[in-house]
Amino acid sequence: MAWDSDAGRFDLGDVTLESGDVLAGAFLTWKSYGTLAPDRSNAVVFPTSYSAQASDQDWLIAPDGILDPTRWFVVVPDMFGNGSSSSPSNTSNYPALVTTADNVRAQRRLLVEHFGIDRLACAYGFSMGAQQSYHWAALFPEAVERAIVVCGSARTAEHNKVFLLSLMATLEAAPEHTGGGRFSAQPAGAMRAFARIYAAWAMSQDWYRAGLHYASTDAASLDDFLDRHWSPGFTRRRAEDLYAQAATWLHSDIAAGPPHGGDLVAALGAIRARVLLLPSRTDLYFPVADNADEVAHLRHAELRPIPSIWGHRAGNPVGDAPARDFLRKAVADWLG
């Protein structure tokens, strides 16, 4: 079955960020899937996750996938810092911090000014994309009917920050690091260490105990799995972009700034969207407990943990068919 698709670049001009810094000549790249209804009632935004670009999420968008492009008009905006939209690798004087809210405000402009969409049927996202979907619901409560948060949270937790700071410190320790997340050359040794730290967090202890690093690949050894199967997912990106996106993740918080001034309970309570929280039971970044604390303060919400040993990757279930089936059913139910 075929469906329409398109891609483009949306120029934002000079954008003043939450920090007060200016992202000069800002732009978002994007892809769309499906056909926008005449009344624009079927729009879904699906922001990218850490290190991902729009094409990395294609496989989730299909009639038998998580988001059906024969029913929904799905717009995938590339995050700032991912190497496709404005990023340190393609923008001189890229600011030290571009927040999740900065991303979502730019995406709002893309949808309104380019597509004429002023209301979303759903904001869907995984991981950092889930943080963006949460921000959509919090920043534009009148414009988001539903939010689906897959392996994400309203605020980056302290334990999650420890992970991110370890990644950033690894890159900062590289001899090629010139300061502020910039590099004189790509730091191959630090990138290899970066990917190995990530591997200990992304998949659960039970996943490794079950030998899925072998069973789900053709790896001959643990080193082979880490270097040949795992690391390329990160080493394909520029170190400065990975550093910038880690800073965005580190500071993600729907309550930051006005009008809530850091009051997370107030920020959650102001969300009008129906929110579906889909954490993985074995996620080390975004544990179920984080979402369990949040759901009590949301007006219309449900918590449905994904029963999987694939850790964080259960929310992006390449190779995990049961988790994919669970997500497909949960999303179909929530979208009606």
Image (cartoon, helix red, strand yellow):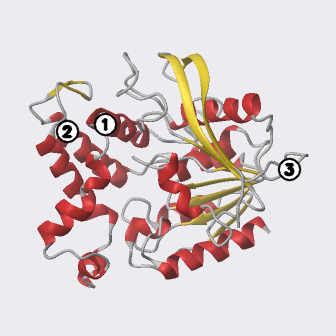
What amino acid type is highlighted by mark number 1? Tyr
Q: Position of residue 150 (x, y in %)?
A: 55, 61
Residue, disc 2: 171
Q: Residue at x 14, y 42 (%)?
A: 188
Point out the image quarter for the C terminus. bottom right
Residue 243: mark: 1
Residue mark closest to the camera, 1 vs 3: 3
How far apart are the alpha carbons under marks 3 and 2? 45 Å
x and y, in percent, of residue 237 in the image:
32, 42
Q: Earlier in the sequence, mark 2 or mark 1?
A: 2
Up the image or down, 236 lies above or below 15; here it is below
Residue 315 placement (x, y as % from top left): 49, 66
* Location of residue 302 in the rendering, given as x and y in whole percent from the top left corner: 67, 68
Q: Are marks 2 and 1 in contact (CB under 8 Å)?
A: yes
Disc ID at residue 37: 3
Task: Check if mark 3's residue and mark 2's residue have beta carbons within 8 Å.
Answer: no
Is residue 300 visible in the rendered structure shown here? yes
Q: Examine the image and state in which quarter residue 115 appears.
A: top right
Q: Is residue 154 visible?
A: no
Vertically, is 149 above or below 272? below
Instruction: Tell me the quarter of the picture where residue 168 sits.
Output: top left
Q: Is residue 331 left or right of residue 195?
A: right
Frontmost of labels 3 and 2 is 3
Q: Amino acid at mark 2?
A: Leu
Give the side of residue 314 with respect to residue 168, left or right.
right
Quarter residue 309 falls in: bottom left
- Say few, some or many: other residues with alpha carbon within 10 Å of mark 2 (under 14 / 14 to 19 / 20 or more): many
N-terminal of the pair, mark 3 or mark 2, is 3
- The label shown at residue 99 is none
Distance between the alpha carbons at the discs numbered 2 and 1 = 8 Å
